[in-house]
Amino acid sequence: MRVATFTSSGKTIEYTDGLFMADAARVSAQQVLDYDRLGTLTWVSDDVKQWVCSLVPAQAGDGMQAPPDASPPRPEGTSSSKSTPKVGLPVHAGPAAPPDPIKRWMERHERLVALAWLAAVIVLIAIGWSTLRGHRAIVTNVYPSLGVAEIRDTSDGELYMAEPVSGLTVWAGDEVRYESWTDEMKRITSVTEPAQAR
């Protein structure tokens, strides 16, 4: 009968013929409880854990074999050669998969994970907003015959040549928004603050 599973490795502790076996090695009920105190076990059920706990004071002298009358609880409806009370244990189809350590960490740090997601969303929104708004610049010179203006980016101070979008008139001193068009040429998309307003 499976008693518990080691959380990290998925190996099981079995109880067979009055012996506890952990990965083909005999262990005592006390050792099983020691593993539990370390937080390395996932029990089949609370009833099985209570049964193992009840064996510790009655452990045999060698510490390896449970007393002959100490039978494990059996799932309801199963037969036994000994008279044991039916405790209604669930029947498991197979060994339980060990919990994912990343999932366990996330469950323990739920608020931290939520804050990290919120921060990531805020950063992405800020990046998207700045991209939609375009870059800011000041018009330093206008060349009407060429249909271009010289602009100085307000964040890095670089000078660029820029062409206003169709129908937009710019003057020297205007604060404008621009977007990249090519490496050499930028496109002025709007005037945010005309020079006459300053």
Image (tube, rainbow, N blue to C red):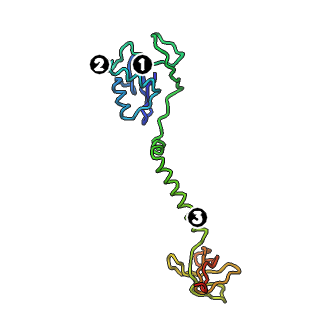
Q: Horizontal and vertical percent for residue 32? A: 37, 27
Q: Nearer the viewer, residue 1 or 181?
A: 1
Left or right of residue 132: residue 31: left
The tag earlier along the polypeptide, 2 or 1, is 1
Q: Horizontal and vertical percent for residue 132? A: 61, 68
Find residue 134 and report its image quarter. bottom right
Q: Amino acid at mark 2?
A: Asp
Determine whether 48 is above or below 133 in the image.
above
Q: Horizontal and vertical percent for residue 190? A: 64, 77
Q: Which residue is mark 2?
A: 62
Determine whether 196 is above or below 74 in the image.
below
Q: Amino acid at mark 1?
A: Thr
Q: Residues within 10 Å of mark 3 (few under 14, many from 20)?
A: few
Q: Which residue is mark 1?
A: 16
Distance between the Cα atoms at labels 1 and 3? 63 Å
Q: Amino acid at mark 3?
A: Gly
Q: Would residue 185 be visible to someone looking at this image?
A: no
Mark 3 secondary-structure assignment: helix
Instruction: Tell me the residue at 28%/17% (across/down).
Output: 61
